[in-house]
Amino acid sequence: MTPINITLNQKSRILELTWPDDEVHQLSCEYLRVSSPSAEVQGHGPGQETLQLGKENINITAIEPVGNYAIKLVFDDNHDSGLYDWGYLRKLGDNQESNWAEYLQKCDDAGYVRKAEGQVI
């Protein structure tokens, strides 16, 4: 399923996707960055994932279409190697609450203290 609208609000750092079934997902740039489908983040197999830290104030600087199946997000930390296909974006939106809770737990387990909103990193 292809989104019918994609809107980036750089001020709030939210990417909004509207789907044909009227579902709307608001995904933070941080969530998208730490969930990047790239090998840098996901590794090359199970158990090879790399926990992404210090991305609280990340923003997207560009959205580039990839055929009719995906977008490439360019982040202001120069990360641009993940292709977010429509299925992956839909899964990120549908499972945002549980995925985010899992990410926060991993940060906590690693002893990482997240920066407050707007705090300089």
Image (cartoon, rainbow, N blue to C red):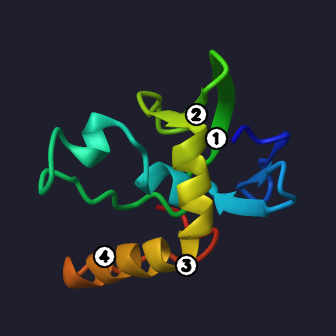
Judge whether 6 appears above or below 92 on screen: above
Query: Gap between marks 1 and 3, in whole Å?
Result: 21 Å
Which amino acid, by three-letter code, is at mark 1? Ile
Q: Residue at (46%, 61%) from the top-left corner?
A: 121
Q: Secondary structure at mark 2?
A: strand
Q: Which residue is mark 4?
A: 107
The percent position of residue 73, horizontal first and vertical second, equals: 58, 33
> Tags 2 and 3 in contact by the CB under 8 Å rule?
no
The residue where tag 3 is placed is 97
Which residue was labeled with disc 1? Answer: 60
Q: Are the residues at dot 1 and dot 2 in contact (C-beta closer than 8 Å)?
A: yes
Say which amino acid is labelled 4: Cys
Mark 1, Cα crowd under 10 Å, few <14 / some 14-19 / many 20+, is many
Label 1, secondary structure: give it.
Answer: strand
Residue 73, label in figure: 2
Residue closer to the observer: 3 or 102: 3
